[in-house]
Image (cartoon, rainbow, N blue to C red):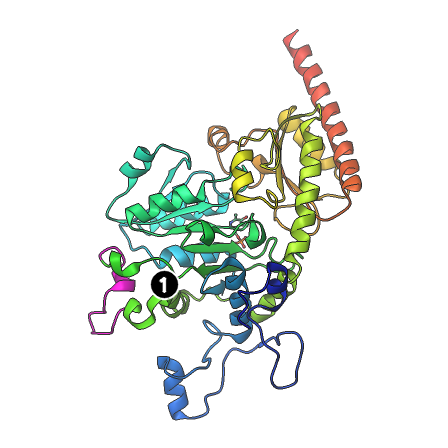
Amino acid sequence: MTSSEFDFDTRQIHAGTKLDSDFGARLSPVYQTAGFVFDSFDDGEGRFNGTVEGQAYSRTDNPTNAAVARRLADLEGGIGGLLTSSGTAAIAATLNSLVVAGDHVLATDSLYEGTRTLFSNSFARQGVEVELISADAPDDVWKRAIRPTTKALFTETIPNPKNDVVDLERLAGIAHAGGFPLVVDNTVATPYLNRPIEHGADIVIHSTSKWLSGHGAVIGGVVIDSGTFDWSSQSARFPNIAVASNRGVASFVERFGRFAFLSYLKSVTALDYGPTLPATSAFLLLQGIETLSLRMDRHVANSLALAQWLEHHDEVAHVAYPGLVSDASYARAQKYLPQGAGAVVTFELAGGREAARAFIDSLQLISKMTHLGDVRTLAIHTGSTIHGHLTEDERLSRGITPGTIRLSVGLESVRDLRADLERALAAAATASASAGAVAGANAA
Ligand SMILES: *Cc1c(COP(=O)(O)O)cnc(C)c1O
């Protein structure tokens, strides 16, 4: 269905899918197949050269995946999308469609650690330099950083785990003045809380492993194209998309118009690298998407209640949650996240690492694990896990202190979550008191 006239709650259930014409199955069938039979010689030729509608091979073209990608593109306000095997694959495929060795990418410096690792390891080894800049750095700092080889500006709507919400409209202005697209990882906000394309983003990616799925059963990702970036005006920067091939094949822009980037992503990058999502995973993702708005409202309400309570707790030195009036990102969240500031609550235990050990070990209801967006509440001490490979100075420069705990707030009752946190905070208090006593005895 074409659905722009429907509300979000309706589109998350209906957009992009149609009733199965063979049996009338209400749910989108799972096309669990590697390949698709051609009707004839001519049909095979047509499916390969794109002149005949129809799939050929599930690496790039599976109807279940395509239906889910259409729904996500609809929710984000894009023209189309591609599901990928993970959020990481979505980021890698997007940037690999824009850069070659020797190129440069700008990114804001508050990022998911896995993305930073992709940039500093594999991209660096491929000869692609990703330069990290503070999102709120002055205009001249951003302007000076732009080179003829700069191919994208990458950011996260609500950066994981610091929650320091970015000014998307300003970043879009910087990217467009420089002649390259703004690529936004919208995982933590979800399209229910923020649609970056409405604020100038050109390409939106998600780890669909998180809130979009919600059940925590599958890994996945998606790339969504707004269709609005003017590739033809930047043909020197993006010859792979905007210039005819040296064999005389017309450019992607000439052949596909505003679908140029998406077509390149699907027919070159995904074809060559194969970051394919299994159709069963796409089906499970779809089951999550259909309840997204209901879950997010509850995630947000629980997160705000816990953040407000933690903020006044003696064992807690600081809470980073943009829904708190006291938070540095509060005003920006009011603008970009009017329906809620997400469901990551990051806080710092006053007692440092030993308090964090006691806190984590005392949790009973809350799961000790890495991951986000599950219906279950999850807690992690990021300094010893996600950020464990860094030096103390590197952690501090990312805002990760020895007492930093990241919560992914789930959908349980707030009363039960508070009781579990209260027990763990009491254990943290005991641990820091005895550590203090030992330190005091040693000093004496
Ligand atoms: C988890 C996450 C990713 C990576 O996604 P995977 O599906 O785990 O590969 C990327 N960005 C953000 C913000 C994330 O939270």
Position above or below: 407 against 228: above
Closest to the observer: 190 or 316?
Answer: 190
Residue type of the residue flagged with mark 1: Phe
Closest to the observer: 24 or 247?
Answer: 24
Left or right of 28 on screen, residue 331: left
Badge count: 1
List the single residue furthest toward the top: 444
The reply to whether residue 189 is in sight is yes
Image point 75% across, 23% down: which residue? 430
Q: Quadrant of the C terminus?
A: top right
Q: Position of residue 182 (x, y in %)?
A: 39, 50
The reply to whether residue 84 is in sight is no
Image point 46% across, 47% down: which residue? 115
Closest to the observer: 312 or 364?
Answer: 312
Q: Position of residue 67 (x, y in %)?
A: 54, 71
Magenta span has 246? yes
Region of the chain picked out in magenta, as a range? 236-251
Magenta span has 277? no
Q: Secondary structure at mark 1?
A: helix
Q: Position of residue 73 (x, y in %)?
A: 50, 63
Left or right of 258 on screen, residue 110: right
> Circle 1 is placed at which residue position?
261
